[in-house]
Image: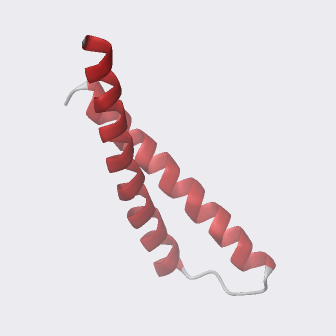
């Protein structure tokens, strides 16, 4: 696994967790019950999306720097 892939996975994981925490905080302060299935779904869905986005962004940046 190269540095680019590791960076994308790490950023996806961090982004997913942060998004789920923020959305969970909104639900909590609105008086809604915390739903673990919803939180896990948010971590996975948003984390995968952000990981893929970051991978292609870093790949494009690396390609431009090598030219």
- The vertical placement of 18 against 42, above or below, is above
User: Looking at the rendering, in which quadrant would you find the N terminus?
Assistant: top left
Q: Position of residue 20 (x, y in %)?
A: 57, 64
**For residue 58, side relative to residue 1 (left or right):** right
Compared with 41, 50 (above or below) is above
Residue 57 image position (x, y, % from top left)? 36, 37
Most distant residue in the bottom direction: 32
The quadrant in which residue 26 appears is: bottom right
Report the residue that reaches farthest toward the left. 1
Horizontally, is 29 left or right of 39 in the view? right
Query: Residue at point 25% right, 12% down?
Result: 66
Locate the C terminus by quadrant. Answer: top left
The count of marks equals: 0
> In the displayed structure, does residue 24 sit left or right of residue 55?
right
**Residue at left 63%, top 62%?**
21
Question: Is residue 28 placed above or below 64 in the rendered structure?
Answer: below
In this figure, which colouring scheme has been used for the structure? secondary structure
**Which residue is painted at 78% across and 83% down in the image?**
30
Task: Locate residue 54: give its quadrant.
Answer: top left
- The residue shown at (43%, 49%) is 13
| Image x and y of residue 62, in percent | 30, 22
């Amino acid at each position: 696994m190269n540095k680019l892939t590791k960076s994308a996975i790490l950023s996806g994981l961090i982004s997913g967790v942060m998004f789920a925490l923020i959305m969970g905080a909104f639900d909590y302060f609105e008086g809604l019950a915390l739903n673990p299935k919803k939180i896990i779904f948010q971590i996975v869905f948003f984390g995968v999306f952000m990981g893929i986005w970051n991978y292609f962004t870093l790949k494009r940046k690396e390609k431009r720097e090598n030219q």
